[in-house]
Amino acid sequence: MDEILASIDIGTAKVAVVIAENTAEGLVVRGFGIAPVEGVVRGTVVNIHKAEQGVISALKIAEKQAQLKVKKVSVAFGGYPTKIIKGHGIAPVPKDRGTVSPTDIVRAIEAGKSIALPEDKQVVDYAVADFVVDGNPGVDDPIGMAASKVECDLFLFVADSAAVANLMRVMEELDLEVTDVVASPVGSARAILTEEEKELGAVMIDIGAGTTDVVAYKNRRPTAIFTIPYAGESVTHDLMVGLKLPRKEAEKVKIEHGCAVEQLVPADQKVELPGIGGREPRIVDRSFVAMIMEARLEEIISMAKDSLVQSGIDPTGDDYSAGIVLTGGTSITPHIVDLVEKVVKAPARVGLPGDVMPIPDGMNTPDFHTVWGTLNISFERKRLYEQVEAKKGKIPAFWDRIKRWILRQL
């Protein structure tokens, strides 16, 4: 058997696990699993024991399919409040070589990650926004270019050290060695956005349970990344209040009868609500359920649009002509594409991880996009650093196979 890789994504509502094998044909999924989780608030672990139980359940399903035990994993890290700040790294190019190598790129990235932070904060991941060669920005592929120095602009994901430590503690308690940490927005975008969308200009809006991640791409580079602390759980909460239901029942109504646009619900459709405390069941119009959901979803989408505009990005303009790509568990809400197109005034679609990379049919759902993107990024990152170290700065033969990743996917 070839090299085995595994990745874990602990979200607010679920844990997803993917196990893959590195074969001559590329990464092949051997097992995947999903399980509900407790002890996680807005993507951040707040109860280690409860979070462990979710990981154990999802891991057992994936390991049973793969028929092996996992010992090493990469993990997705997200949640709120993860801050995204900008960094800048510079690496001089040795005069005796005079051309940019992968080692120079790695050195520039590491320099950009080395920023002063409070003791309770740390950089958990990064994304390359641009390469600059001898003062010239917008360089698509600096490898092999004659230069005296190479620079890179970075998005740095900064989190509370305690939040990172709690996530690592979950892994340690299960005797899992963490080999890499990938920021959730980066992992999601890797799995969801096509190369054409990244080139033309597109915005991914990942509406999960606890948070909404937004990533804009143009010319195959991320141009803005941010997280909104409202998502599917906010919709559930509003249904709890508006329908006077416990959380479990409100979530069930959302899944079975939800709709993102009130006007698109037939007037005669009704929803039976369970009686609480021995009371008789109640009947409400499905359009009333949709009205509650539409109000919150419109607010979340408007917040995403406003944040893009504040970042200097016009999602309706020609620079982002590929439009909006929705993902995350809330993206399966009926007519959510109609709502997004109304609010943002840009074309939209729902993205699945199978749109970009081949995966088993049962895994082609919004539950697995982050964990699958995380696994691919961590695998290619591992290969890069191993080969750069082995070659001591020389351009290795493997470069053609992975340069798209280092230049366009980070």
Image: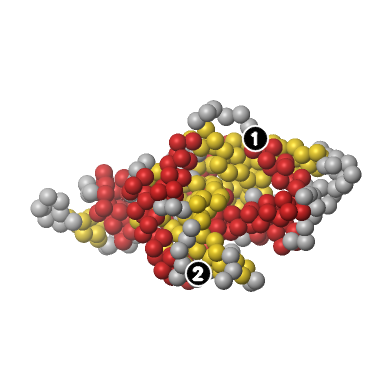
Q: Secondary structure at mark 2?
A: strand
Dot 1 amino acid type: Ser
Q: Residue at x 50, y 64 (%)?
A: 19
Given residues 117 and 299, the one toward you in this image is: 117
> Compared with residue 262, is residue 31 higher up or lower down, i.e. above or below?
below
Q: Name the disc covering residue 152, or none.
A: none
What residue is disc 1 on? 114
Q: Alpha carbon of mark 2 to alpha carbon of mark 1: how far?
A: 37 Å
- Which residue is at a point 36% across and 54% down the rendered structure image? 54
The quarter holding residue 60 reads bottom left
The residue sitting at 72% across, 42% down in the picture is 107
Q: Is residue 44 left or right of residue 386?
A: left
Secondary-structure class at tag 1: loop
Residue 352 image position (x, y, % from top left): 51, 62
Q: Please tell me in which quadrant of the rendered image residue 191 appears.
A: bottom right
Question: Dot 2 corresponds to which residue?
Answer: 30
Which image quarter holds the N terminus? bottom right
| Residue 58 appears in the figure | yes
Residue 270 drawn above or below residue 389: below
From this viewpoint, which residue is outermost toward the right? 96
The answer to whether one can see residue 34 in this image is no
Q: Earlier in the sequence, mark 2 or mark 1?
A: 2
Relative height, residue 70 to residue 137 (above, below): below
Q: Position of residue 336 (x, y in %)?
A: 44, 56
Question: Picture coordinates of residue 99 (x, y %)?
Answer: 85, 48
2 and 1 marks in contact (CB < 8 Å): no
Residue placed at 44% from the left, 58% from the top? 16
Q: Identify which residue, 291 or 241, lies in the foreground.
A: 241
Does residue 191 appear to the left or right of 238 in the view shown? right
